[in-house]
Every structure is written in C-alpha cells, then in structure tokens.
Image: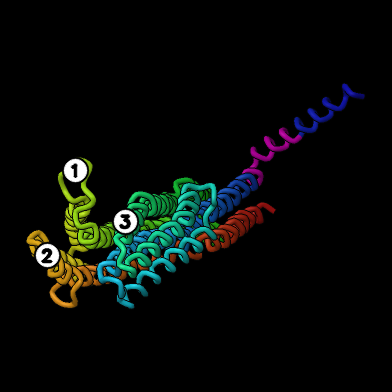
Amino acid sequence: MPVTVPAQRGGVRSVAAERLRAAATTEPGRLQIIGAVLALLVVAFGAVTALEVSGRASAADDVVTRSQPLSADAADVYRSLADADTMAASGFLAGAEEPRDVHEQYETDIKEAARLLVKAAASTDTSSPSGKEITTLNELLPQYTGLVERARANNRQGLPLGGAYLRYANQKMTDELLPAAERLYAAETARLSADSADARRWPFLALGVGVVALAALVWMQRRTYRRTNRVFNHGLLAATAAAAVVLLWLAVGHTVARAELQDAMVHGQESLDVLNKARINSLKARANENLTLVARGAVLTADGTQDRYETDYGTGMKALDAQLRSAGKLAGDDSPGSEPVARAATGVAEWQERHRAARSTDDQGDYDGALKQIIGPEDSTGESFARVDEALRQALAHEQGEFTTAARSGRGALGGLPAGAAVLAVLGAVAAIAGINRRLSEYR
C-alpha cells in the first residue's frame, strides 16, 4: 500500500496534464485557458492596485492628520519655551512689580508647552527618539519654572540673588530644554518627510500588471477579429475598457497626488521650517537682549573678553537675517506669504538700529535710559520685536494653510481609487469571461 499511493497520485497528475494538453489542442480548450488567464490578470491588476494605492493613501492621510500636526506641535513647543524665557527676562527687567500682561504671557507659554507635550506623548511611543525627548522636557520644565519663581521672589525683595537665579534658569532653558525641543522637532519633521516620501512613491508593480493585463486583452480582441472577422466582442471590449479606466485613473490620480504632496513639502513645509527657526531665533535674541541688562556684564564668553548675552544676541540676529532672506525666496511672488516676511525683515532692521542705540546709552552709564529703550512702551526694541513676531506669526499661518490645502488635495486625488479599482477589476474579469463564453457558444 505505501508504494501504490504515490503511483496513484502520479497517475492522477499525469491524466490531468494529458487532459490539459488535449484541451490546448482544440479551439474551445484554448479559449477556456485564455479566458481564465485574462480573468486572473484583470483581478490581479485590481488587487495590486488596491493594495499599493491603499498604502500610499494611508501615508498621505498620515501626512495630513498625524505627522505634520505633530511637527507643527513640536515647533510650537519650542516657540512656547523660547517665548516663556523671553517673558521671564522681560518681567524681571521691569522690576519688583512685573507687568501683568507679561506675567500672563509667561504663564500661557508654560501651560501651552505642557499641554502640547501631553498631547504628543499620547500619540508617541515612549521608546522612540521623540518619546525620549518628550520625557526629558517633562522632567526639565518644572525645574525651569522653579528657578524662575525663585528669581521673581528675590527680585520682589530687591535681592541681587534674583538675577543669578534668572541666569541659571536661562542657562537651563538654553542648554537643556531648547536643545531637547529642537531634537523633538527634528524627529517629527523627519517622520513627516518619510510619510510624504512613502505617499509619493510610484506604484510600479500596479502599473506594470495593468499594462500586461491591458495588452493581453487587446491581443485577445485582435485574435478574435482575425479568426471570426468580427470587429467587436462586447465582453472583451468591456473588460478592456475597465482595465483602461483603472490604469488611467491610477496614473493620473497618483501623478496629481504626487505633485500636490511635493508642492506641500516644497512650498509649505520648507517655508514653515525656515519661518519656525526664524521666529525661535527672534525670541532667543530678545531673551539675550534682556539678559544683557539683567547680568550687566557679569556673564562673559569663554575667552572672557565679551558679554556672553550680547554676543549670543548678535549671533541670533545674523541667523534671523539669513532665515528671513531664505523665507523671502521661498515665498516668491506669493503676496500673502511674501508681505509678512518683508515686514519682518523691516522690523528686524529697525530692531537692530534701536538695539545699537540702547547699547550706546548703557555703555555711557545710563542704565535707566537703556532700560527704557529696551522695554519702554514707545520707540523701544521691545516694540520692534513685537512687530517682527506678529509678522512671522502671520507668515507661519499663511504657509500652514498652503501646506494643508496642498496635502489634502494630494490625499483627495487617491480617494476612492482602491475601492474603484477593486470593483472595476471584478467587473472586468466577469466581462472577459462573458466574452469568452460568447465565443465558446459558437462551438456548441
């Protein structure tokens, strides 16, 4: 018995192969084989298209709903922390009676940073690079706010120790919090770029299978015409039309999606990245400008020759100038985007001029006069900074809108394609079989 079973199985396979060869030698048999192959090709085309496009549509949806919002939130965390540091220094400079609006802005910034960190933590794996930075920021933020509160308490009592606490708080912000926030922003922006690249990858397999299926259908119609002299086989014609529609939909839809997503990254995200960095540099420059008066020359650069905060202010303003030039080039002829950037550049020039005047006043020993030129209500560097910050806020809002519009258009271009391809493929396969059966009926 153990010897005869393989022989029986081999015999069955041999009989099946013989029947297949016999069928292939007759026209009805060949038509049945061709019909099965055509149906399988059309179904495979629909399945591969649905699978590949679903992956790209999912990546495009991630760009719109997850990665870009997380990148924007990370930038807002950075901005809120930098602004909080600026407000802390501004409030300290004002004296024992900190202006209410400055204190409220500081509190708003801290709450916003904490809120965004909680939001980011809810959608981020704690073991990922972003998750680690979020944990670091959550640990450091209470330490920073504690130092600021000590600085305020000492300042209200007129104790010089308040300035030391504020400088220590600024050091923690500059050396630990802001670098962690920058790394978080870089990680989320990299994830955005990866999602966008995934959404824009060409579906080469689907396109290849589609071309093969369409070519096979055209070949079969030509074969039918040459053997019967009939111009049309309605079933095969319908199957060919279905495959052509899916192939055209795939090529055009993905081309449009790719173009829109590319536009979102080039004219949206690149501008957002430059503008976010420009706004952060302006905030850091403002904090360093305030700390120059707080420290009053007590903190020097590593070589001991210059005021550290004044040096950092100059470095930040140079970076801000360069970023505004880049933002202007990226905005191009887009007036709603270029106008706020131009206003920001004008505000920076005015800010630098007023800063030089304030430094000259301070160098002459008139501290109160310099203080007025820095935080005064009129013709102060603070007024110029506010203009720059507002212009950058408007530019960011415009570019965010441009990104969202383009990215949603890209996602929309892929909408319905997976389901449509699957339905049309099934209809095309049925039509192909019906067309072949119509030919088979002629032999009965």
Amino acid type, callout 2: Ala
- Badge 2 or badge 1: first in the primary sequence: 1
For disc 3, the neighbor class at 10 Å (few under 14, some 14 to 19, many from 20) is some
Determine the CA span between mark 3 and mark 1.
Answer: 18 Å
Q: Give the dominant element type of the magenta stretch: helix, strand or loop.
A: helix
Q: Which residue is mark 1?
A: 304
Q: Which residue is mark 3?
A: 164
Closer-to-camera residue (186/177)? 177
Question: For the residues carrying marks 2 and 3, which lies nearer the camera in this image?
Answer: 3
Closer-to-camera residue (62/109)? 109
Residue farthest toward the right in the current orientation of the protein: 1
Question: For the residues carrying marks 3 and 1, which lies nearer the camera in this image?
Answer: 3
Closer-to-camera residue (230/46)? 46
Residue beneath the point at 60% across and 59% down? 426
Determine the CA span between mark 2 and mark 1.
Answer: 23 Å
Q: Is residue 371 left or right of residue 429?
A: left
Q: Is residue 105 above or below residue 42?
A: below
For disc 1, the neighbor class at 10 Å (few under 14, some 14 to 19, many from 20) is few
Q: Is residue 41 visible?
A: yes
Residue beneath the point at 17% across and 68% down? 371
Across and down, in percent, residue 112 comes to 42, 68
Q: Is residue 301 left or right of residue 261?
A: left
Marks 3 & 1, CB-CB < 8 Å contact: no
Magenta highlight range: 16-30
Across and down, in percent, residue 247 comes to 45, 56
23 part of magenta stretch: yes
Q: Which residue is mark 2?
A: 358
Across and down, in percent, residue 20 comes to 69, 37
